[in-house]
Image (cartoon, rainbow, N blue to C red):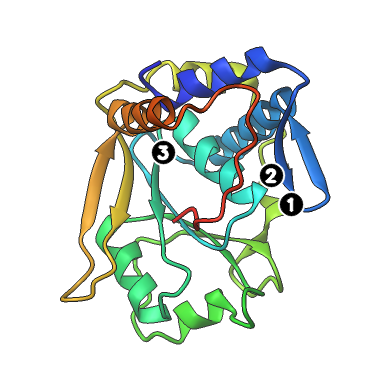
Amino acid sequence: MLTIPQVVRAAAHFGEREALVDGSRRWSFIEVVHEIESASRAFIAQGLKHGDRVAIWAPNSAEWIFAALGAQLVGGVLVPINTRFKGHEAAYVIERSGAEFLFCCNDFLGTNYVNELQQSGSSPQCLSHIVVISGAVDHGSRSWAEFMSGGSKTSLEEVHVRELEVRPDDLCDIIFTSGTTGKPKGVMSLHDQTIRVFLEWSEIAGLNDTDRYLIVNPFF
């Protein structure tokens, strides 16, 4: 497996086994793949092209996973944003990466991220779509449910065509540094690099298909 699409397809082989738990919500591997495909269909409907950047500024959730892998399945590039960043810091990352899509939450630790961004005084010109995963949906943004429903007319065949275009040496992630000693800098990772890091870590850690992994670290 050398691309994220290949990993997603391999996950389907585990069928009805439990794959993801988020609070009281649970998904099998087949259901996770279905949610990722649905997100991919929505991205295609919204005009995502191969290489387009998708920023996620939100705490861990199942939707975070579906948005990230849904974009990468059809050639999108993931740009995670630190949930502790202020509006002007997030705006810098969005502008610097050229992200056209932003997924965020408006109810995390009492913070409305859309307002934070709008009040930062540096609204990114590249940003065309804002999707609110949870919390109040502000003017100019849409809810997660609205985003997902937008892909209903996109066929799975279109998703399959797009995922076959993703190559191991395509850009997969742009992960920005914290900016402690200067402006945050985007570290660019390819599909095969991202997968190789996980494969090597899981082998060293002894991870196997009977294990359950508690994700404590923030996805960004």
List the residue tagged with mark 3.
Answer: 76
Whether residue 4 is visible here, answered yes or no, is yes
Q: CA distance from mark 2 to mark 1?
A: 5 Å
Determine whether, in the image, residue 145 is placed left or right of residue 163.
Answer: right
Q: Amino acid at mark 1?
A: Ala
List the residue tagged with mark 2.
Answer: 148
Q: At which x and y percent is residue 204?
A: 38, 29
Question: For the residue carrying disc 3, how many other residues have a C-alpha within 10 Å: few (<14), some (14-19), or many (20+)?
Answer: many
Instruction: Say which quadrant the C terminus sits in.
Output: bottom left
Q: CA distance from mark 3 to mark 2?
A: 16 Å
Q: Nearer the viewer, residue 55 or 157?
A: 55
Q: At which x and y percent is residue 175?
A: 31, 53
Dot 2 and dot 1 residues touching (CB under 8 Å): yes
Q: CA distance from mark 1 to mark 3?
A: 20 Å
- N-term mark: 1 or 3: 3
What residue is drawn where x is 20% and y is 61%? 185
Residue at the farthest right position: 24
